[in-house]
Image: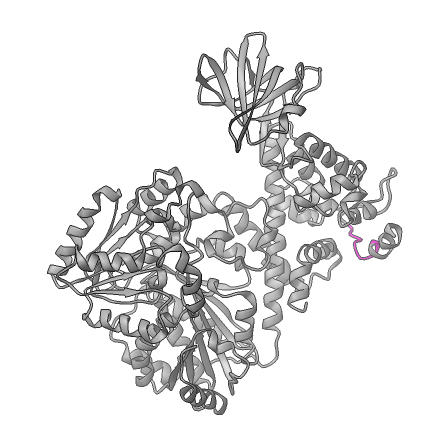
Amino acid sequence: MVASRSTRWSSRLSNPDRTTQAVGGIDRIADTLLLDSKVSAIKGVTPARMKALEKLKVRTVGDLLTHFPRRYLDLSRICTIADAPLGVPCTIDCRIHEAKLKRPRPKLPIVEVTVQDDTGTMIISFFHMPWLEKRLKPGMRLAVSGKVSFDYGFKRMTNPYFEELADKPVEGRLMAIHPATEKLQAGHLRRLIGQALYQTRGMLDPLPVALRQKRRLVSRGAAFQGIHFPHSQDEAASARRRLVFDEVLLLQLFLMMQGQKRSELAGARAHLTCGPATRALIAALPFSLTDDQRRAIADLHEAMSAEVVADHMVLGDVGTGKTIVAAFGVAAAKDSGGQALIMAPTEILAQQHLKTLKPLFDAAQIRCALLTGSTSLQERALILEGLEQGSLDVVIGTHALIEDDVIVRDMTFAVIDEQQRFGVDQRAKLLAKGIAPDALYMTATPIPRSLALTLFGNLTHSYIRQRPHGKAQRKTIAYDRTDRGKAYDAARLALARGEQVYVVCPLVGDRSARKAKQDAADEDERYHPDVTIESEEDYDLSDVASATKEAARLARTVFADHQVGLLHGALSAEEKERVMEDFASGVTDVLVTTTVIEVGVDVPNATVMIVEDADRFGLSQLHQLRGRVGRGGKDSQVFLISSSKMPNAVRRLEALVKSDDGFEIAGYDLSLRREGDILGNKQAGASSLKLVNIVLDADIIEEAHEDARAMLDADPHLEQPCHAALAREMRMTFSDEIQVSGG
């Protein structure tokens, strides 16, 4: 089978830059194709080991070679037990004296191992790994790596990494530590990877030689060898750089080629961007646009005026005025005889957009309507008729817009707001309402450029960093729960000035009521999936502020002289609208709410926000929450209340206190949570990124994006012989996504 595939691919993979024929007993085509074979093709992979590898998501030979080390054990820097410094990671060469299994509590097995070298004795404790008692035998030689402490008269290590050593002297080298399982330990895994490297030693390098030389990249074979079996940190770093470049380049090629499919669709409209609706919209603006807004509008109009499909993204911090950019896209669609749809993730946000945009649309004679899950049947029928007949120019709505009975006569422009909250299929369904419509994607999560290029490499981008109300100051303060009275004092002072207050709680009601209320919740917030809990031990439900109970308590005590409202996702759409209208109009002074107000609520008079149990929210989510205050030009304050002592929680809150810049916060969040997590749901292809660190690898990402674009400009379908191997690699890497998208 391999021979026939080798014959079939040999002509397609031929490349003047590399040798593809069998040389010295090595068949480069066969070795390359072996990467796609089942991992059982590697000598030493038994059926039992195949099952163990399956748990590590290693199914093919290629998966095995891309099962990268999580760290390295530096065997060139071994110290003795006597010299081992306290509190500092170190590696010790020692022998086992004895191993005992202890159970101080029924569900707490501890294997206590006494190890020795020529300078002393050390105790190693392994928690929740009782099987080690049988594995670790007296006399066995180990290299153990971890932090050393001193307690009860002995130096100690807790749950260190260990590696069984042969009787030969330890060589001065790095030892890769791969993620392993109980049934397949790191040493066995390393030997299988070594065998896989040998059996694929003739693999072709998919990168053209000219590109490798331009970026000074080692060959792929050398990179795999260097990352799994490096002789130095420099060799490991060089290998990692090459493999990170590969990951990003392949993803960029996939995204850009998927984007090309849209741009090649027949029927794309070259929009008019200076027509009467656009001019009327400019004249109707009650405020001056910021420079960033002007640039974003110009970028969008430039993309829409081209004769190919536009896919543009506007990235901006909360409160920077992204919605007005969408309005100018709608005006261009109106001036070009087309229609538009604006899809938002929640009813509240859709209603907010309508409230903001309708006066401007009326002035520009752009006919608009709102369609959500709570729209009455009679009103819905009129809206559907208006869309199909063309009497409506734009409809703002929620997921209701992608229902099958929503038919648009001539949709040429679509807006997807908070696009990361929609799945790939939902976004595709909206775009399918038109024939090759231009698309604008917006997000209030300020994504750094490196992340935007990685996950949205097929889109053009505009950034909005300036806030329209530039003079307003927003201050964030973190208080322990014992000091939250200070936050209440600040809130009462704001109320005395005629301003308004938010109090945000992470959960609604109690645990027993959550399921019933979630079933009753509509398409809004429900129970926000981004609420985070640092650990199970830290989760004490009696300690979690409940919005319903908190509203009653505050109305009875702290804010007894003021009107207190309650908003959460379990309310009906009518109730939510009434609660928000009361707060926006000033009838309600204090609004106790869940994260349903994270996006879409714009009350200029709200100047104070108190976030209870702030440690239970994600960093970017907290930043978006605080964007609800200070939107009217008045100085504002945000108080983060937390009693958590968890280090990560403390660091997150400190970051918010130090910076009010959403892009800076997002960068820090990425350093904690890595690439796709900051966006909530993963983007297409993101699962292929195993090594990429968005923060540390920004330069490599820029280079790979630039090279992918240049490559496709010269060879749009990667049909040239020098790109054949790369095209195949890309197709194999993203085969699932390509099949789903119909490619």
Q: Is residue 128 magenta?
A: no
Q: Which colour assignment does the render follow?
A: one colour
Residue 615 placement (x, y as % from top left): 35, 46
In the picture, measured across the screen, residue 393 lies left or right of residue 265, that is: left
In the picture, measured across the screen, residue 3 lies left or right of residue 669, that is: right
Question: Principal SS element in the magenta part?
Answer: loop
Residue 430 placement (x, y as % from top left): 52, 75
Q: Is residue 13 magenta?
A: yes
Residue at x 62%, y 58% (from the top left corner)? 253
The answer to which of 512 and 201 lies nearer the viewer is: 512
Residue 119 seen: yes
Residue 215 position (above or below residue 12): above
Work out which quarter of the rendered image holds the C terminus and state it: bottom right
Residue 28 position (above or below residue 305): above
Residue at x 71%, y 32% (from the top left corner)? 188
Residue 505 position (above or below residue 140): below
The magenta-colored residue range is 10-16
Residue 141 placement (x, y as % from top left): 66, 17
Query: Where, by quadrant of the figure, is residue 357 drawn?
Result: bottom left
